[in-house]
Image: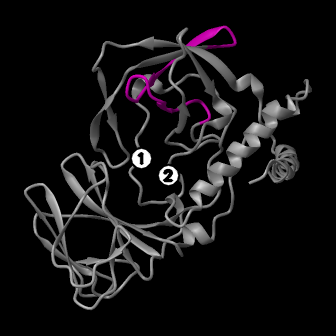
Amino acid sequence: MGKFARYALVGSMLLALAACSGGKGDSAAGKAGPAPDPSFLADNAIWRNERKQDLLKPDGWTSLVGLHWLELKAHYVGSSAGSGIRLAVGPPKLGMVEQRDGHIYLTPESGVALTLDGEPMTGKGRVELKTDHDPAPSQIGFDDGKGLLSVIKRGQRFGLRIKYADAPTRLQFTGLDYWPADPGWRIVGKFVPHPPGKTMPIVDIIGTSTDAPNPGAVEFVREGKTYRIEAMGEPGNQLFLVFADRTSGHGSYPAGRFIDTPGPDAQGKVVLDFNRAYSPPCAFTTFATCPLPPPENRLDLAITAGEKTYASHPATL
């Protein structure tokens, strides 16, 4: 996108944001104060647009239509009524999936047009499917690329994740709502490192606990009080924070929100821009497995910034 087009887009988004910011009944919105810096609003508008576009990609989170857990046996997979694992979409008979010795294999149904990582599977026999814990997870395409089947691993369980470009959750997406952008919620915090190799247990929405790398915590001050959020991520890389606050279930998504932020600078400073706090995938689909905030990250603070809870209940096929 050229520079002129980029800022034309920003201008239109700023007008839309201004319209959305009024009349929402938020007590903070009614307080008079200096207007935020235009560059701050422009950057925030660009981030919001990218967030929306990411959700709405043909294989984005709004395209999820199924999650099927595997047992220690072979499963015939397809959309027909007689399938051991019945899909909501796709060919009546897709193939046979089996779990063996911690590996997942697919034997495609003869004559069905499938792809493996974008390449036709014509004439292929049984293939191993790499999971989302592997460096390059496998993707099985069907219905001319509209559908994708992949394997996820949660604890010791394996599941088939199904995405479909024509999912109602994607085609009927109603948009995102935010608190008004406020530079006061862009806070510089202090990184408190942990000993190398430290992990912390993270429980997801289906009850699976995973030990996640926990390089340190971020401390920040709001209205004279210090708060602390434990961070996930590898040392030296971007930090991932999962938190809940007093708005959880009262404006923002009940199960908490996420923030991505660069790691600490040379002085140990970390920028927490709560205007960019966003809802987990579970806010948009019932087929995601989202991490929940650990007890340490449940803040006694109403963070009236960032993404509000999604207004529409997840639709299904």
Q: Is residue 284 left or right of residue 99?
A: right
Q: Is residue 164 magenta?
A: no
Mark 1 or 2 closer to N-term? Answer: 2
The disc at residue 183 is none
Q: Quadrant location of the N terminus?
A: bottom right
* On screen, residue 43 above or below 87: above
Which amino acid type is marked by label 1? Cys
The residue beneath circle 2 is: 281
Count of labels shown? 2
Q: Position of residue 147 (x, y in %)?
A: 43, 74
Q: For the residue labelled by badge 2, is the local secondary structure a helix, a strand or a loop? A: helix
> What scheme was used to colour the molecule?
one colour
Give the Cα distance between marks 1 and 2. 7 Å
- Viewer-proximal residue among 200 and 197: 197
- Asked where in the image residue 30 lies, by quadrant, the reply is top right
* On screen, residue 124 above or below 282: below
Q: Label 2: how many residues lie within 10 Å, few (<14), some (14-19) or many (20+)?
A: some
Per the rendered image, the range of residues in magenta is 221-247
Which amino acid type is marked by label 2? Pro
Q: For the residue labelled by badge 1, is the local secondary structure a helix, a strand or a loop? A: loop
The disc at residue 290 is 1
Q: Residue at x 38, y 46 (%)?
A: 205
Q: Position of residue 139 (x, y in %)?
A: 34, 65
- Quick one: which residue is furthest to the left in this view? 101
- Viewer-proximal residue among 107 and 152: 107
**Pointer 1 with pointer 2, Cβ within 8 A:** yes
